[in-house]
Image (cartoon, rainbow, N blue to C red):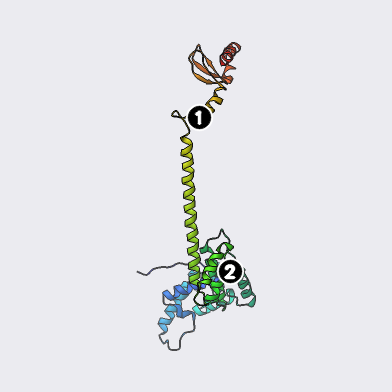
Amino acid sequence: MTTKFKIEKFNVSNFSLWKLKMKAILRKDNYLAAISERPADFEDNAKWNEMDENAIANLHLSLADGVLSSIEEKKTTKEIWDHLGKLYEAKSLHNKIFLKRKLYTLRMTESTSVTEHINAMNTLFSQLTSLSNKIESQERAELLLQSLPDSYDQLIINLTNNLLTDCLAFDDVAAAVLEEENRRKNKEDRQAGSQQVEALTVMRGRSTERGPSGSHNHGRSKSKSKKNFNCMNCSRFIGIREYWLTFSGILLTWDLLLFLDDKSQIRRQAEARAF
């Protein structure tokens, strides 16, 4: 069974990446030759026409509506391919300078992941390659190292000091930077776990300072007892702002006393017992 691949439709942005993916799909389906001139030794007209039509169908299905309308009158795969290149693959000196400036000033922040940063660099490398300005592996590696934040200075020193030759390979440098990021994440995870264990130990230590009944130490109990009294009738321990109605066994607050008929008498009795 043939595996189907879908790519994001080209909508005028990032033509170089779309072009790379589109060529991969045409190559997979054996239609890539259709984007070039027909070889002189290709004599099977029916086979060539079939390949060309299938390649056109792939291109049409991979273009957004706004772009598709611009190639409506193009009859062959090569005509469509060349027309898209003229429109969106600007090979001007201005475009090259803009992309190079963006590449050479690119800096990774501490909050950015290494994977995101490398992907951003690879996008710029690809765009420059499509403009016939390929950045070689050695220069790519140097650009990656110089774009790292200051916290990676020791890694840069280690990499450059351990070189047996003057050549840096981009893939090797990228792998080393990714490994360093993973090492830092693992260290942070261990530190976070250690802090959690320490916090739990402190909490357990505090719980041992309480008595069997859950109350705090004796010194705190003394200060709290000054604000409380015992009911003279049943010896119940109550807060000083609460009043115990002894003849009915009901615990009252100051607010509830406002709704009783004989408030003054009950208040006098409760305050006399409080002291």
Q: Choose top left, top right, bottom left or bottom right for residue 271.
A: top right
Q: Quadrant of the N terminus?
A: bottom left
- Residue 85 position, x and y percent, is 56, 76
**Three-letter residue code for mark 1:** Asn
Instruction: Write the residue at 42% across / 74% down.
Output: 28
Instruction: Write the residue at 44% across / 77% down.
Output: 31
- Residue 164 position, x and y percent, is 49, 76
In the visual, does 189 lie left or right of 259? left
Q: Badge 1 local density, few (<14 within 10 Å), some, or many (20+)?
A: few
Q: Looking at the image, is mark 1 or mark 2 nearer the viewer? A: 1
In the visual, does 256 lie left or right of 32? right
As drawn, which residue projects farthest toward the right? Answer: 94
In the drawing, what numbered circle is on residue 258?
A: none
Instruction: Write the residue at 49% across / 18% down.
Output: 236
State whether residue 104 appears in this view.
Answer: yes
- Residue 209 position, x and y percent, is 48, 33
From what the image shows, is residue 192 above or below residue 94?
Answer: above
Q: Looking at this view, is 51 or 262 the one in front? A: 262
**Three-letter residue code for mark 2:** Gln
Q: Badge 2 local density, few (<14 within 10 Å), some, or many (20+)?
A: some
In the drawing, what numbered circle is on residue 217?
A: 1
Q: Distance between the residues labelled 1 and 2?
A: 60 Å
As drawn, which residue projects farthest toward the bottom? Answer: 41
State whether residue 69 appears in this view.
Answer: no
Q: The residue tagged with tag 2: helix, strand or loop?
A: helix
User: What residue is disc 2 on?
Assistant: 146
In the visual, does 112 lie left or right of 31? right
Q: Looking at this view, is 39 or 166 the one in front? A: 166
* Labelled pair 1, 2 in contact (Cβ < 8 Å): no
Q: In which quarter of the image is the C terminus?
A: top right
- Residue 223 position, x and y percent, is 56, 26
